[in-house]
Image (cartoon, coloured by chain):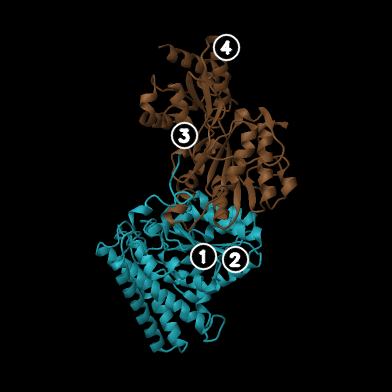
Amino acid sequence: MAELTYRDAVARGIAQEMQRDPDVVFLGEDIAKAGGVFKTTVGLLEQFGPLRVRDTPISEQAIMGAAMGAAMTGLKPIAEIMFSDFFAVCFDYLANQFPKSRYMTAGQVKCPLVVRTANGASVRFGAQHSQSVENWVMMIPGLKVVAPSTPRDVVGLMAASVRDPDPVIFFEHKGLYASKGEVPEGEIVDTLGTARIVRPGKNATILALALMAPRALAAAEKLQAEHGIDCEVIDVRSLVPLDMQTILESVGRTSRVFTVEENPRLCGWGGEIVSLIVEEAFFKLDGPPVRITTPHIPLPAAEGLEDLALPSVNRIADTVRKALET
Amino acid sequence: MATQTQAGKIPARPNDDIGREVRLRMYRTQIEIREAEQRAYDLFLQNLVKGTSHLSLGQEAVAAGFAAAMQPGDLTFCTYRGHAHTLARGASVEKVLGELMGRDNGLLRGKGGSMHLTSVEHGVMGSYAIVGAHIPIACGAAWSAQYKGRKDVTVCFFGDGTTNIGAFHEGLNLAVIWNLPVIFVCENNLYMEYTPIGEVTAVSHPAAGRAGAYGLECPIVDGQDADAVYRAAQAAIEKARAGGGPSLIECETYRYSGHSRADPAKYRPDGELDRWKQRDPIKLYRSRLLELGIGEKALDNIDREARRFVDEATEKCKAAPPPPADILLTDVYADGGSSWRN
C-alpha cells in the first residue's frame, strides 16, 4: 500500500481507465503538455499520446459539446473544466444537453462521459474561482454527481464514473489536492451511490462531503476528546445516486443529524437530505436537524474572511455540542 | 473568404455529374418534405399538433441536396427546424408526424416533440433547440470518427441566427485546429427569428463573412437549387472524408412561414415572399427535370405517391394511441429508469 496525494490520485485514476479502455479519451485546457494547472494530469500525454490526451482552447462550450458528440458516437470522454465556477459559461451542456438527450430521444442517444472539475474554497482565489457548485448540477434529472474526499476514493470513483453509462460530474476539491492517503496497488473500482461511515458513533450523525469530510471527522474527534460526545461521521461521496439507506440507518441509531456543507446555505445538498430524513424518519429524531453551511454570500478572497465563511472544525464542534445540550 | 459559386448556371445534362437517379431522388425528397410540412401546418390548425413547430417550407432544397450527397453512416445534426433534415435522411413521415402529434408511434414516443426529432438508425443524431449548442457536439461526433479511423462525416445544419452565438465560434475554431471531418451548413433564410439578420450582424453574409477568421473558404450557394446544394455538399463531404478537414457553406434560402407557429411573419416587406416563391425550389427543380427530358408523368407519379404517403401516415397517426403513462419515468438514466436514490 503506497501513500499518494489526492492530486496524483487523479492522474492515476484517469490512467487506470485509459489503460483499460482505448475508447477513453481526455480533453481540456492545459491538461496535456502542461499537466494541468493543478498538476493533476502530469504524465498522461506522455503515456497515452496526443490523440487521446488533447489540449483545447479556452472554449468551455467546445469542450463540453465535443465530449458529448464523442460520447454519443462510441467514445468515453473525460472532459476537464478547470474550475467548477466555469460551469456557468457552458451550463447549457450540463442543464439541457447531456442529461436530457437519452430521455428526449426515448433512449436512442447515449451520453457516457465524465466532467471532472476543481471545486471549492480554501485556496483564497475569491468569489469566481472558489465556489462549491455541486448543488448547481445535483438538481438536474439525468446527471450523476460525485465528490471524493480521499485519494483512494478519487481513483475508485473515477473508475466507477468512467465505466458508468450516464453523464457523471466529478468534483475534485482544490483544498484536498495536497492531502495524502493510502491507496492500494492494482486496479481500484468503487461504486457510485454509496456513502461511507468514516467514524461510527452513537450520539449524532454528521453528514459531510469533500473537504468538509475531514473537517467533520476532526470535529467528531474533538467532541469525543473534550466532551465525550460520540458522533457518527458519514462521507456522502455521491449526491446522485444518493445512498439514503446508509443515512437513514445511521439517523435511526443516533436520532440526531447534522449536515456540513461548503455551499452557501440556500438549496445546498443538505437541505434535500434533511427534507428526506424529516419525511421518512421524523419519529426517530430526538431534535431538529441542523445544517452547518457557508453563509449566503459570495466567497471573499482574504484568508481570514474565507476561513470565517467556511464551516471550520471549531464551528462544526460547537454547533453540534450546543444543539445536543439543548 | 467568401466565394460566390455559379452552380445554378452550370448547364444540366441528363447524364452529367449528378445524373437522373440522384435528381429523381432529390425531387422526391423535396416533394415529401413539402407535403409533410404542409400537413404539419394543417394538423396544427386542427389542433392535432400541439406545442410549437418550425417549418422548412421553402427550404427543402438544402435538406434534399445534402441528404443525396451523404452516405449511410454519415451523421446529421440539426436545429429545432429539423423536420426536413430528419425526413431527408430517411425517417418515416409517419414517425415524424406521430411525434409532432404526441403519439406513441412517434420517433421519440412523444417524449421529445417537434424540436428534438432524432433517428439514430438514419444517422440523425438529434435536433437541438438551444441555438448553437449542436455545433460543438457535431465536432465531437467528427472527432470520434477521426479517432476511430471511421470514414463517416458529420454534417451540421443551422440558421443564420446561430452565427451570432458563442458556441458557433468555439466550434468552428475547434473543428479547424483539430482538422475534423465536419461540414457546417448555414441555412441563411434572412431572418433571425423575427429580425432581419442584416440588422443584427456585423457582416453581410452571416457565415461566409466569418469564414476567413477561421481560415476557411465558404461558398455561398443558391439554396433554392438542389443541384447547386448537392454539388457543394459533394465537394465538402469528399474533402472531409479524405482527411481534408472541415468546411463551412452558406445556403441562401427563404422560409415561407413565420419563425414558428406563433409567428405570422408580418415583419416581412410586401412582395418579398412572392419574389421568393417565384424561385420556389420545387418549381425550379421540376422545370429543370422536364428540360432534362424526364417525363411529366414520372414527376406526377412522385407527387401523387408523396401525397398518398403523407395521407396514409396522417391517418395512422390519428389512429395511434397516445404514449402510455409508464414511459413518463423511463430512460432518464441508462438503467432505463429515473431512480436517483436507494
**What amino acid is found at the position of numbered circle 1 in the picture?**
Gly
Q: Which residue is mark 1?
A: B123
Are the residues under badges 1 and 4 in a single subunit? no
- Residue lying at the far top of the rendered structure: A226
Quadrant including the N terminus of chain A: top right
Chain A visual colour:
brown
Q: Are marks 1 and 2 in contact (CB under 8 Å)?
A: yes
**Element assignment for label 1:** loop
Indicate the chain on which mark 3 is placed.
A
- Disc 4 marks which residue? A225
Q: Which element is circle 4 on?
A: helix
Q: Earlier in the sequence, mark 4 or mark 3?
A: 4
Pointers 3 and 2 within a single chain = no
Residue A113: x and y, percent? 56, 48
Disc 1 or disc 3, which is closer to the eye?
A: 3
Percent position of residue B119, x then y: 46, 63
Indicate the amino acid at tag 4. Ala
* The chain coloured cyan in the image: B
Secondary structure under tag 3 reads helix
Give the Cα separation between the discs numbered 1 and 4: 64 Å
Tag nearer the camera, 1 or 4 = 4
Q: CA distance from mark 2 to mark 4?
A: 66 Å
**Label of residue B152 in the image:** 2
Within 10 angstroms of label 1, few (less than 14), some, or many (20 or more) residues?
Answer: many
Q: Please give the name of the residue rendered at 41% of the width and 61% of the height, measured from the top-left corner.
A: B81
Horizontal and vertical percent position of residue B217 = 59, 63
| In this view, B289 is above or below A266 | below
In three-dimensional space, the C-alpha distance between marks 3 and 2, rounded to whole angstroms, equals 47 Å
Camera sees residue A211 = yes
* Marks 4 and 3, how far apart at CA: 29 Å
Q: How many other residues sit within 10 Å of disc 2, few (<14), some (14-19) or many (≥20)?
A: many
Q: Earlier in the sequence, mark 1 or mark 2?
A: 1
